[in-house]
Image: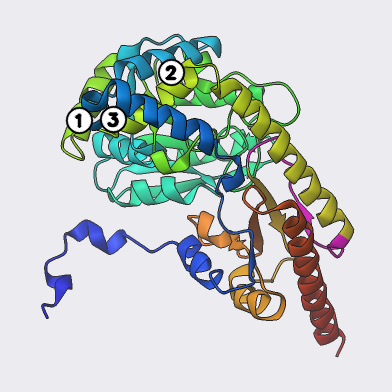
Amino acid sequence: MPDWTRYYAQRVTGMRASDIRDAFKLAEEPGIISFAGGFPAPDSFPVAEVRRLLAELLMTEPAAALQYGPTEGYYQLRRFIAGQMAGEGIAVEPENILVTSGSQQALDLICKLFVNPGDTVLVELPAYIGGINAAINYQADLVGIPLDEEGLVPAEMVKILKNLKAAGRRPALLYVVPNFQNPTGVTMSSARRRQLLALAAEYDFLIIEDNPYGSLRYEGQPLPHLKTMDGEDRVLYLGSFSKVFLPGLRLGWIAADQAVIQKLTVAKQGTDLCGNSLGQKLVYAYAESGRLEPHIAHLLSLYRRKRDIALSSLTRFFPPGISWSKPEGGFFIWLTLPAGLDARALLPQAIAEEKVAYIPGGAFFVDGSGRNTIRLAFSQVGEEELVEGIRRLGRFFAGVLEKRRGATTA
């Protein structure tokens, strides 16, 4: 067998397996209640309607539905997306849209286009692991900007930007999930969004606005997108059908200046030639039939109830000393344990003793911090399992804290 390390490209040395995938493996044992995967609830999938629409597509236009399609994506779907975005205050045409194989491919294509080895990419601290890995794959130097309950902290960001400028470095990109952020559930305030755009203009960098959860707001009023407030075309907007329709179709999109879309299209041609023709036609048929909006309304009711159950269960079962976020939407609740506890080290013990799993938060921090944090995903778990799983987890951490107090006083 060859020594494969002799053949790998230099960029492979920076690639790393995700702690999330490792946690998934641990959670595969029978009887485990898992809060690990930020997946849509499978019982929310409109299976009967999808079955009927697929039958219609294969009856009326089988060749087009099963054939290769244009790299940019199915035009009618791009026109629908543009109309939806216009309704949210973003003026785009179909030519400003590139359909991608999920938002993850969008992140990869953008990094391929804009990131050279050694370039600085700014990310949230903590940040979505998929965004982190997309930048690492192109040998970026990642710099994290701390979050608080309103999103990116401007004073910390200014300090980082000034230090980079003094060192003769300009960030290539900033990657941000402003609505119901993965992993924390935090939503960036309107004031912070305006400050971020002003800093992008002052320090001359581009922004990736990733918005997979934007339609899943359970309370409060929608905030303007960064792209809506962007007067300089610095924002590359990412959307997705994965959280509001069918994740297995792997359909997302990029909205950007037409010149950028043209370059991204060339990059996509070298990646997969074109996307999923059948899936794109299915999404368009479902949306054009008027079913998408009622389906999203159903999802809002479903996930709002799950979020409320999760929050009330945390209040009921968790011991003092542990705090958590209260998201207005999305799939995630962020837990902070007392300083000194290591959520990753405790995970195998939680699985063995209580048959409950979570994602250690340290995986989302590019600076190695966050060891005392946890991401809980409430979206996929059934309502009874939500209560039982949080009860088990609360009992586990109550025991951990009790042992810690005993060790301290001994």
Q: Residue at x 31, y 60 (%)?
A: 14
Do tag 3 and tag 1 residues touch (Cβ < 8 Å)? yes
Disc 3 target residue: 277
Height in image: 115 above or below 129?
Answer: above
Q: Does the magenta stretch include residue 328?
A: yes
Place of residue 27 in the rendered image (x, y in percent of width and height, measured from the top left): 56, 69
Whole-angstrom CA distance, mark 3 to mark 1, is 7 Å
> Magenta stretch?
317-330
**On the picture, is 57 further left or further right than 40?**
left
Query: Is residue 130 found left or right of 124 in the rendered image?
Result: left
Q: Name the residue under label 1.
A: 67
Q: What residue type is labelled 2?
A: Ile
The image quadrant that residue 273 belongs to is top left
Distance from Cα at disc 2 to Cα at disc 1: 22 Å
For the residue carrying disc 1, how many other residues have a C-alpha within 10 Å: few (<14), some (14-19), or many (20+)? Answer: few
Q: Do the residues labelled 2 and 1 touch (CB within 8 Å)?
A: no
Name the image quarter holding residue 131: top left
